[in-house]
Amino acid sequence: MKRITQLGLAAAVALLAGCSLQEEPYGFNSTTNFYKTEADANAALVYAYAILPEIEYYSRNFILITELPTENITLKPDAGASNFEFDRLAVRPDNPELTTAWRYAYIGVNRANAVIANVPGITEMSDASRNQLVGEAHFLRALHYFNIVRLFGAAPVHTTPVTSLDQTSSARATMQEIYALITDDLKKSIELTDAVRRDGRANKVAAWGLLAKVDLTLASGKATNSPGYDFVPNADALYAEAKTYAGNVLSNSGSYGLDPSLKAIFDVDKKNGPEHIFDVATDRSGLSEGNYSKLPLMFIPYIDGAVFKLADSTSVRSGYNHFVTEPALYNSFAADDKRKTELIPSRVYVGNKETVLSITGYSRPFTRKYLDPKQVGEQTSANTPVLRYSDVLLLYAEACGPTAEGYAAVNRIRTRAGLTNLQPGLSVTAFRDAVIQERAWELAFEGNRLFDLRRTHKMEEVLVQKYGKTIQPDNAYFFATPTRETDLNPNL
Amino acid sequence: MRQRYLFSLFWLLLLPAFTWAQTLTVRGVVKDATTGEGLPGVTVLVKGTQNGTASQADGAYSIAVPSTDAVLTFSYIGYLPLELPVGGKSVLDANLKVDNKSLDEVVVVGYGTVAKSDVTGSVASLKGSELNKQPASSVDQLLQGKIAGVQVVAPSGEPGAGATVRIRGSSSINGSNSPLLVVDGFPWGDAGNLKQINPEDIASIEVLKDASSAAIYGSRGANGVILITTKRGKAGKTSITLSTLNTLSTLPSKLDVWSDPVDVAVIDNESRRNAGLAPLFVGENYLGTYYPSVAELRGEDPNKPAWPYRTYWPDEVYRNPFSQSYTLTATGGTDRTKFSMSGNYYREEGLAIKNYYDRYNGRLNLEQKLTDKLTAGVNLILTHTQRNGGSLSADRSPVFPIYNPDGTYFRIGPRDFGNPVAYANEVLNKNKTIDVLGTLFVSYDITKWLNFRTQLSDKYGNSIGDVYEPRNITNTGYLYNGFGVIDNYSSNELLSENYFTVNKNFNEIHNLNVVAGYTTQTFNIRTSRLEGRGFINDALENENLNTALTQYTTNGLTKSLLNSYIGRVNYSLLDRYLFTFTSRADGSSKFGANNKWAFFPSAAVAWKLNEEAFLRAVPTISEAKVRVSYGLTGNQGISPYQTLDRLGAGRYYTGGNFQTGFGPGIFGYDGFNKIWEGVPNPDLKWETTSQLDAGLDLGFLNQRITLSADVYYKRTRDLLRQTYITPSSGYDRLWVNDGVIENKGVELGLNAEILNGPVQWSVGGNFTLNRNKLISMGEDNFVWNGSSIEMLRAPVNAYIVGEPINVFYGYKTNGIIQTEEEGRASGLTGDMARPGEIKYVDLNGDGAVNDQDRTIIGNPNPKFLYSLNTSLRHKGFDLSAQFYGVSGNDVFDMRKFSPSRQLQRWTPDNPTNDYPSVNATRAYYGSDWFVTSGSFMRIQNVTLGYNFKSNMIKGLETLRIYFSGSNLYTFTGFHKGFDPEVPYNGLQYGSYPRPRALSVGVNIGI
């Protein structure tokens, strides 16, 4: 009996001890079992794009940190202190929104790196598809590093995905090294991608446009002696290169062009309009924020919580009134500039009662660049534009300088806005300044103004001298590296 | 007692054989001195002879004695023997006293039992009958104040709400701090929400507090262990008992809410004016709602009729609920078969309308001797619960009615979704659970001293939640045009335990008890959530989610495995020197590849001084034992899969629809913020607590007075913590082990039987003192614990190195600003410097109040806890009372500026320093203005009962009727109208009121 019991016990123990303590994941893909098929490759790229519309990136935070420091917007009075730090250009290195901007750009880099590292090894797909996917990933990595280097200057660089703890801390690369990587990525993207339009995705045209912007950033930074651009060898060569790439967009892209109607550009039902070279895509049918956007609610005033109408009968639900238009921008428009009269409504109607929003009031005239009249609950389909045709057209004008081509480009923009042509005969500097000002009006609220002022060395001239703001140290041309990075990265 | 009954019947049959042979007869009744109940089967002997008898079922006896000066001896197991001289009397009653020092009283210690007198660790024991008789959907709540060293915080009076249980403080900052709960040997999980057990079924509750006793549970023992043992069968006549408890509850006190419409209008207008907004109560429409003027509300407006509404919301939202509990129990058996079974129906109605909690519970413990050496058995617990509704707010303006004239719910403005009556009536909010715990065991006595036991258990739990929020009732319902959810959860745990027990005595000098074995437990949790948004109408609620415009599904499965080796040696020398060595080795799939196995050793020594000759000579000291223990226990509160490289998933809108992507970085939530994780940590492991305990057990006058005292020091290292990793890696956080926390404290328990004659009076109490301190947290010295609180735009609780956990962090204040100059002089600017505002202190004296001026402003951890109980018995009556107190803790009172206090607001005419002016848009800072002492003492329970004499009603062996009152009164300086027992972190938002419960209970035994 005893023996039988012992045998029984031994068997029971053997059976149960046989269960391995090794964990096997359920519901998770891991690097080892993924990246096998074309569908996997597609999904890898989709994930790389999916970081863009997160609230911490283009659907709020990126706009917050790039627009608040400028003369475009300020905040409702009871907004959080960390937001006000941007408005007052007094951003501390531990600012949560600053940290978020840093984090999300690098999360994007890591996702793009995963595509660049793993998709080329997938053999079960055509070269064309593989090239397209890898080329778009190079575009995305370039975009994230372009954001990082414009916001922070020198920063750590990862060109392979991080999969273990010992890979987490990279040394800081110089701006020159980062720009070399960006340029290289965009050239690879141009080489690998086609020019087919796919909503929410980049292609060869987007890569041309972004490379033009990169070149112009370097060129204008060098030409204006803006801090940090000493390494650039030759401004004129880069202006010329920018002109080439921007020119490619203007001449080689059948389905892109200027939209004759300003309002149509920002109509969420016309996302395939000619101006959209690269947008961050959202849709109100999404299941969570990041799939849909709440960015419009940040700009829309709170009219007693009511649903109100604009003069053209567009229906708008009261928003958060969080970002409010600054008089500096609003009053800088010519009175008949359509970009003000059509895109910054100041009259709202609750029932038949008209309310005129004052530019100095609590609820002010607000941009309708982010607006979805078919909003479901708080879910909107408002995309955030990254690269518009008019942006590239103005890049081209700036690259050309006061030539016939340059004037023609800027005047196309002015004509559409209902303005007269730009004064002829301007000097190179005066012309480029005029183009930068044109960009301020044309691209207001779209996350360009801060970078335009920084790369043209105009932060003090415009924000301090013209608009009376103050700028704290470590805020003017680059923000400080976030504390979390400096605390944790021993290789900085 | 039942088996004695059989004996007495046997003796009864023999009785006539004695009676006729003798001439002198003495009669009488043998009773329990405590309860006054008759004791059957008591052996009655004429001293110095073999002449004896046994008492009958009602305790009556009759015996022939040889002479009038004979002496009778009465003896009965579990009672002290008694000798009485006959002294010529013919009637002689005997009152037997319970032998408190009963040697066969055993304590469950996990994988075995030990005699109470042989316990070497810090183990507290409570009988099921000592639990208060009050409605309690979870057993944990009933432990409050019962055991020294055990803190139970039950801030909510909602039926089905759980409690926070802490043994000897908190020893983790991210892992669980709840003790391990073990039900009939099955490690159930975290204590705090044990709804599946009917309190009536509990035979005993043991609490393992020190390392020596808890180490047998290894990596789950660091927070202490609570062992619950349900009732077992006994050989003897079957007893059937029915217990009922019917309870009527009321609100414990008048709530601090608005009652007078005029007050609301005056305060609201003033607070809007103070904020620069136009007042609303001016007799005009605003967003579709007519706001009467103050004069109109007062009935002083000649042009307006008297205002028709004066809604007192507590009357609409709360009720006096009626709760019921019925338990039918059958216990009995023979020498070979023993059983205990019960069925329970429990219904607790909440104070809030429509809110209730139902439970159906069945239990079976069956044990069969297959051969003389082999025993097999089954333990089964089945529980079904159902909850409906929940908390409702009574903080609503009395100016407005509940309903519109057309019967629809009245809304204050188009986006008002705060009507609690609408919420209670229209929102679907139900939850159903099924739990099954089944155990099959075989126990084999290989030799007289060696036993092998193997058991297989399965615990299955299932829960289904139903939610539907209609479009016009809640904000979510409005945003989505109807919002429906079905939440599914099922868990399955399989446990196999196999162990040998050695019990051997050598020459009456050495006594050895050894337990050694192997256990393995698997854990599987499956979840799914089906969500539908946007419905054509609200008629189907969540019944057909497929008809929703948008459907959203999530599901998950977590699996883990725990393999363990257990071992314990109890050795006693001369029954005086006791040694215990305990250890457990745990291998968990959740631990990192480099740390798969954890080992937890412990040792304890005890010395029974009362067995030494020098103390045997002192008869007043019946027990004197000193105990010392030291050992390691662990905490493995890690989520599975943290050690693996995993890819995240997300969606992006392209090509006209959403596409799914996979890649590095998993979206997560660290409790407060969105985070991205996914870098594996192969070194991840358990937290280790080392604990030193020294204790003293004293008993006097044959245990009439007992005292137990413990001091302990606990130090926990390798705290599980989510550290930040370099953000440029593309990840945010990673679970690591660093950080140290310590707890030290004192526990005292005292019981005294002051009177033990016909009137019995006993008094008991316990005292718990714990000091907690965070020693280190890796690279951090300060971490908020909690998300930002909307009103304060900052969290309140913080983990600060060198401080107790959860201290409040914020600004100091110094009354109310009386003049503009005073405000500016204190370093405040703008609106915050105005008279009537709270005067925050510029602590660092730099001339400006900013976040550099924050400091520690309060500590929610009590200085000590105490409890007192007393009971009085006379004849069939018994009266008992329990008091529970918490002292020296701070509460952060979010409801500080309650309506009654807004009426005492600062105004230029009332320059108070207590309360600021009212202001509709004031931005508050987290400050000590909100901090209030949370000390209280509660009359927790008073019970008055009567035990009827056996068979007074024919067929009823026992009958007891009692009245019990719970939460009768609370002595406290805390905010009137609110309960001072707030959640563990000290933040009081005004939780579900704790009812005052008045119960009638009946216990019937057949």
Image (tube, rainbow, N blue to C red):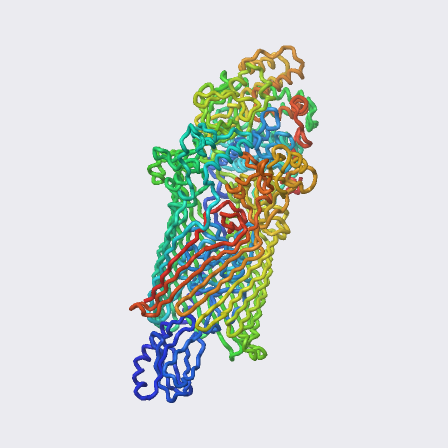
In the image: residue B318, left or right of residue A359: left
Residue sitting nearer the eye, B64 or B856:
B64
Residue sitting nearer the eye, B833 or B573:
B833
Q: Quadrant of the N terminus of chain B?
A: bottom left
Residue sitting nearer the eye, A450 or B608:
B608
Number of numbered discs: 0
Q: Which of the 4 image quadrants contains residue A426? A: top right
Up-down: is A92 above or below B857? above
Q: Is residue B337 visible?
A: no
Residue B359 spot, x, y in % from top left: 37, 53
Q: Quadrant of the C terminus of chain B?
A: bottom left
Up-down: is B634 above or below B1? above
Residue A37 spot, x, y in % from top left: 46, 37
Q: Is residue B381 visible?
A: yes
Up-down: is B782 above or below A247? below
Residue B616 spot, x, y in % from top left: 55, 78
Residue sitting nearer the eye, B740 or B996:
B996
The residue lying at 63 percent from left, 10 percent from top is A424
Residue B662 spot, x, y in % from top left: 49, 38
The residue lying at 53 percent from left, 19 percent from top is A252
